[in-house]
Image: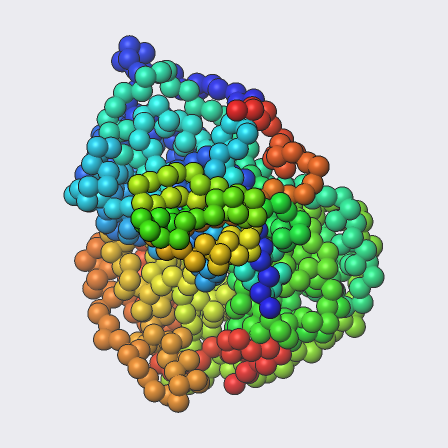
């Protein structure tokens, strides 16, 4: 077993030296020693002893009171996506804990590190159907990377250290710790020690890849005539955007980013070719089936990217760089698998690849870009109809923020349009719910992102449907005073579902039209200023008002009602089957 | 054609791990034919032996990687029958009423390699160890008497390699029980 160094960094308070900490105090002290600065939470019966301990820790731990536990989870996700450290959510047992399940499932699919601390009924009541008891270990098992029930106060420091280690190491993910009320109120029977280094013997993910695997990958890449890179979330999670840039520039290979990998490459980089997938770019999709070597970095070949696996990139040799060995050969067979962290793998790969450029191959992408621009982009951004199109609003936002803002998007048409038209200039700039597609994600996640990156402009872009799923978090934002900028792209429809009903269900619009509230009045009720714009001539000025506000602000943009998002690869079909109009 | 695969899963001994492993099967709609969990010769290491039948070796390989991904799992191996020594244990409670056909104990012992482990007043309990095939053949034989109860354990299996358990485990100080 590797050595565990144990240290106490903070000065114990006078009364703590007289006696051992309670479990609740140990939770607080553990978070401080872990370097946590923010907890997103909501109190309740079974977690009250810990909230009582928090009362004495307010100078060291910032707690943000959300309005619903789901908001705590998504805010912690937004925070984690900005900082690459585990976001912390703390809630009570029963319904408090079940309300956290959607963010946890979302974080599992999008590899977001979370540590969720959940209260549980007293130890002697476990299994008795006690008030607010629920088997949250059982419920959360399939959607957590690891979970654990603490029944003994003495376990707390070690379990919390292990939780952070597991959440952040390897492929990150959500961890849940269920702590009985008794474990919070009981005193520890030994002095508090927080292990600074944790070794979980059964979980030692490989970060540095095997040299022979890197060499095999380099050999394929160097022999390629039409290589193509798909860069995913793993690049950002490994902080490998600089290595990726160096790699593509040396090897001269065109690169696309997945939805979660968005902003890992500067959108204006000459080698950047957009994104693949259901609403990705024309060339980025079609040329997947023409490249000879497909280099996947930190991505998992989600079905929204591959469409029909039976026809996906069958002509290509596949290099798959991935930290999670379970992803290798899961969906797409890898001719050259490289198990390791994207940063370490790219560092090892860069010296082995030849300086190259593929002008003819890159021209293929440009050819498709030109068609896409003519058939789609031009119509979206130089629209002349009465109503504002989502695309033109996002393009204007992108220009006004110089592509340097963080956009936090919800799920649906606006999400696809935002990631299509926002020109990301900086890494860690697109936060979205990709794998789970959780409506209601954006508002709390944008708030969490602003807490994690207070110096960056954070703009939540949300549809009118998704906004109503978590709009109570306007209260959290107002109370914090943080200048989170909120745009509702309102088309009065559940737009993406409506689009599918139009295209695949004979325009049978089944329950997709909303009777919306007055969003501006709602915002004002929460103490947040805002206004509505529906006239194109006032769009620019409206965005200026939003961006120049030093307080939270809500801008509702009334958009064309029946706009469709193109290009589109219908679900489960071949990536060359792109609908352009 | 479905093939039988035996999975040997070594884990740290933690509460709830059984659930975490079985949900990987249920999520993929895989039926577990048999499941045996026991401690091993190393402190804190448990061993799961799970038998499944599947028509795709590739799918079983993916399954193995998903199981290995569980944080508390130390190692996973998937075996075909010829790669392992395996056995099950079956118990038969057989009625021996007064005036019934007597059991041929010698035949049971010598020909069937089974033994009576308990003599009741009007029944006996017979233990038969062996492969599924051998147990099923014995079943055909013993059903000439009245079977009051029959049950068998899941498979236990060891790989036909020279290696010891500790060589499969991550590097560490694995104390012998």
In the rendered image, residue A524, in percent from the top left (x then y), is placed at: 21, 59
Q: Is residue A367 above or below residue B9?
A: below
Residue at the outermost bottom position: A506
- Determine the residue positioned at 24% across, 29% down: A182
Outermost residue on the top side: it is A18
- Quarter assignment of residue A124: top left
Q: Residue A28: in sight, yes or no?
A: no
Taking depth in this image into account, of A510 and A270 the one nearest to the observer is A510
Is A356 situated left or right of A20 in this image?
right
Colour scheme of the rendered structure:
rainbow
Along the line of sight, which residue is nearer the eye, A504 or A538? A504
- Residue A564 placed where, x, y %? 44, 80
Vertical comparison of B56 with A371: above or below: above
Q: Is residue A322 above or below residue A576?
A: above
Q: Residue at left 32%, top 27%?
A: A152
Horizontal side of A297 relative to A316 (left or right) equals left
Left or right: residue A260 versus residue A26 is right
Visible residue check, residue A30: yes
Total numbered badges shown on the rendered structure:
0
Residue closest to the eye, A533 or A17:
A17
Give the quarter of the image for residue A512. Answer: bottom left
The N terminus of chain A sits in image quarter:
top right
Q: Residue at (31%, 48%) from the top-left corner?
A: B98
Left or right: where A511 falls relative to B139? left
Question: Which residue sits at x=56%, y=44%?
Answer: B110
Percent of width and height locating residue A75 = 36, 49
Hey, which residue is sitting farthest front in the picture? Answer: B99
Q: Is residue A519 above or below residue A50?
A: below
> x, y percentage for residue A282?
61, 76
């Amino acid at each position: 077993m590797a050595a565990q160094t144990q240290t106490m960094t903070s000065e114990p308070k006078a009364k703590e030296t007289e006696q051992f900490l309670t479990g609740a105090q140990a939770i607080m002290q553990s978070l401080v020693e872990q370097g946590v600065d923010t907890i997103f939470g909501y109190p309740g019966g079974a977690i009250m002893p810990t909230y009582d301990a928090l009362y004495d820790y307010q100078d060291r731990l910032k707690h943000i009171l959300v309005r619903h536990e789901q908001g705590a989870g998504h805010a912690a996700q937004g925070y984690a996506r900005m900082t690459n450290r585990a976001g912390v959510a703390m809630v009570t047992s029963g319904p408090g804990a079940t309300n956290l399940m959607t963010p946890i499932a979302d974080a599992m699919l999008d590899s977001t590190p979370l540590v969720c601390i959940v209260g549980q009924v007293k130890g002697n009541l476990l299994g008795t159907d006690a008030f607010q008891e629920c088997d949250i270990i059982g419920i959360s098992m399939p959607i957590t990377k690891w979970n654990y029930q603490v029944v003994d106060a003495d376990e707390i420091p070690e379990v919390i250290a292990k939780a952070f280690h597991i959440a952040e190491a390897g492929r990150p993910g959500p961890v849940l710790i269920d702590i009985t009320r008794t474990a919070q109120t009981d005193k520890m029977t030994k002095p508090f020690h927080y292990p600074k280094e944790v070794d979980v013997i059964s979980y030692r993910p490989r970060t540095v890849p095997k040299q022979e695997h890197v060499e095999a990958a380099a050999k394929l890449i160097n022999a390629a005539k039409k290589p193509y890179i798909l860069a995913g979330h793993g690049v950002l999670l490994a902080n490998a955007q600089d290595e990726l840039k160096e790699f593509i520039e040396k090897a001269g290979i065109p690169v696309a980013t997945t939805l979660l990998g968005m902003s890992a490459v500067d959108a204006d980089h000459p080698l950047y070719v957009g994104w693949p997938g259901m609403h990705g770019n024309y060339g980025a999709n079609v040329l997947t089936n023409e490249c000879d070597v497909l280099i996947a970095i930190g991505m998992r070949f989600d079905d929204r990217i591959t469409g029909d696996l039976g026809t996906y990139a069958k002509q290509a040799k596949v290099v798959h760089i991935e930290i999670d060995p379970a992803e290798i050969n899961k969906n797409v067979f890898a001719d050259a698998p490289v198990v390791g962290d994207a940063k370490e793998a790219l560092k090892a790969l860069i010296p082995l690849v030849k300086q190259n450029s593929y002008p003819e191959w890159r021209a293929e992408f440009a050819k498709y870009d030109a068609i896409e621009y003519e058939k789609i982009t031009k119509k979206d951004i130089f629209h002349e109809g009465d109503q504002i199109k989502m695309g033109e609003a996002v393009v204007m936002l992108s220009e006004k923020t110089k592509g340097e803002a963080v956009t936090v998007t919800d799920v649906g048409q606006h999400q696809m349009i935002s990631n299509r038209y926002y020109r990301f200039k900086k890494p860690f700039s697109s936060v979205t719910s990709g794998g789970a597609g959780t409506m209601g994600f954006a508002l709390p996640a944008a708030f969490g992102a602003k807490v994690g990156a207070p110096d960056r402009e954070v703009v939540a872009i949300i549809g009118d449907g998704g906004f109503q799923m978590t709009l109570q978090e306007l209260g959290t934002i107002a109370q914090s005073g943080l200048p989170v900028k909120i745009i509702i792209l309102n088309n009065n429809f559940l737009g993406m579902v409506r689009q599918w009903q139009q295209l695949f269900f004979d325009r049978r619009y089944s329950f997709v039209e909303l009777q919306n509230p007055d969003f501006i009045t709602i915002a004002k009720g929460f103490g947040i200023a805002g206004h509505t714009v529906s006239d194109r001539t006032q769009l620019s000025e409206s965005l200026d008002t939003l961006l120049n506000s030093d307080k939270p602000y809500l801008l509702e943009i009334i958009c064309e009602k029946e706009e469709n998002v193109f290009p589109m690869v219908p679900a489960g079909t071949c990536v060359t089957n792109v609908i352009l109009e | 054609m479905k093939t039988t695969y035996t999975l040997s899963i070594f884990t740290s001994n933690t509460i709830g791990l059984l659930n975490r492993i079985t949900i990987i099967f249920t999520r993929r709609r895989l039926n577990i034919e048999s499941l045996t969990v026991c401690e091993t010769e190393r402190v804190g290491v448990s061993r799961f032996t799970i038998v499944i039948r599947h028509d795709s070796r590739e799918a079983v390989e993916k399954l193995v990687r998903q199981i290995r991904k569980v944080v508390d799992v130390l190692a996973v191996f998937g075996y075909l029958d010829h790669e392992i020594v395996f056995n099950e244990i079956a118990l038969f409670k057989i009625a021996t009423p007064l005036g019934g056909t007597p059991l041929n104990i010698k035949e049971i012992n010598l020909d069937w390699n089974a033994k009576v482990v308990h003599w009741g007043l009007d029944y006996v309990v017979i233990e038969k160890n062996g492969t599924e095939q051998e147990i099923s053949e014995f079943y055909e034989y013993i059903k000439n008497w009245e079977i009051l109860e029959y049950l068998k354990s899941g498979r236990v299996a060891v790989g036909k390699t020279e290696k010891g358990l500790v060589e499969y485990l991550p590097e560490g100080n694995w104390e012998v029980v």
